[in-house]
Image (cartoon, rainbow, N blue to C red):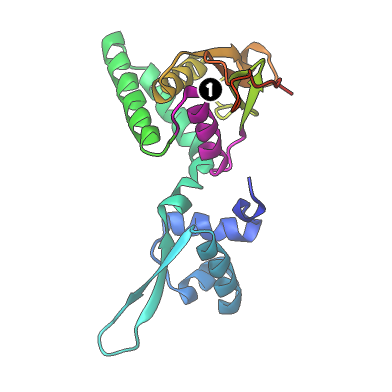
Amino acid sequence: MSEKRRLSASDRKVVDLLMVHSPQEINELGKRLGVTATAVRQRLGRLMSMNYVERSTVSEGRGRPVHQYSLTEQGRLSCGNNLADLAVALWQQVQQIPDAAIRETVVSGAVDRLVDKYNSEIVGESASERMEAISRFFGERDLPVRFEQNDGLPVISVGGCLYPGLSDSGTKICELEQQVLERVVGDEVQLCTCQRQGDRCCSFQGSQVQTDAVGKVASGSLK
């Protein structure tokens, strides 16, 4: 992931604030953050250059137009890691539904929505190309996902559990991720390793061997 994608602690405060209070003017942001208007302008300038924040102009009566700032779609997605607690709570609540058929319907509906979302973002002709595109997609959202090859087979590895609060879920979450990946990739994907079973990372391996431009099997291994 490029360095410009990495948010500093001060920039993250602006993003988190705009996630809750949006749109905001510079003076309002300065008061909430406890910094000068100049400092706010500098942070907003960086975030706009990263396409995390957008500016709009609003006319208020006969006074001078004012600039207001809000998060872009990319900025809102960057807050995803901060919502892990909500994801855990929702998952635990779904598991409390007594009717198994209803539980399955809710989970299947969530999987369908994720597949639709990712299919609109992921581009690639082969299964391997789509797995690599998936890795880039999540990498741009500051998630520890990387693409590798293992004996010519495409592999997506996830370092660090994304849902550490789900200690009692076993491999259910990973199996759901596997289902989503298979539907987005359009081919069989195998869950090879799982942190919940003591492995150092979760990894998902495709079934199609990747070849280079002259048809030779591309080599590589998990590091």
Q: Is residue 165 above or below residue 104?
A: below
Q: Can residue 177 be seen in the rendering of this structure?
A: yes
Residue found 29% across the figure and 81% down from its top: 59
Q: Along the line of sight, which residue is nearer the eye, 165 or 133?
A: 133
Relative image position of residue 3 (x, y in whole percent):
66, 52
Residue lying at the far top in this picture: please name it: 100
Residue found 67% across the figure and 15% down from its top: 151
Task: State which quadrant residue 64 falls in.
Answer: bottom left
Q: Is residue 109 above or below residue 11?
A: above
* Rendered-image quadrant of the C terminus: top right
Q: Residues within 10 Å of mark 1 (few under 14, many from 20)?
A: some
Q: Is residue 180 above or below residue 19?
A: above
**Segment tinted magenta in the rendering:** 124-145
Residue found 50% across the figure and 64% down from its top: 48
Relative image position of residue 23 (x, y in whole percent):
38, 65
Residue lying at the far right in this picture: please name it: 223
Task: State which quadrant residue 34 falls in.
Answer: bottom right
Task: State which quadrant residue 183 falls in.
Answer: top left
Task: Please indicate whether residue 24 sits to the left or right of residue 2 in the image.
Answer: left
Q: Is residue 153 above or below residue 145?
A: above
Q: Can residue 170 be seen in the rendering of this structure?
A: no
Residue found 62% across the figure and 35% down from its top: 144
Q: Which residue is mark 1?
A: 166
Task: Report helix, strand or loop for mark 1.
Answer: loop
Q: Is residue 133 magenta?
A: yes
Relative image position of residue 182 (x, y in whole percent):
43, 19
Q: Is residue 190 magenta?
A: no
Amino acid type assigned to the residue bearing label 1 in the image: Leu
Residue lying at the far front in this picture: please name it: 214
Q: Along the line of sight, which residue is nearer the eye, 168 or 192?
A: 192
Task: Please indicate whether residue 40 sits to the left or right of residue 106 in the image.
Answer: right
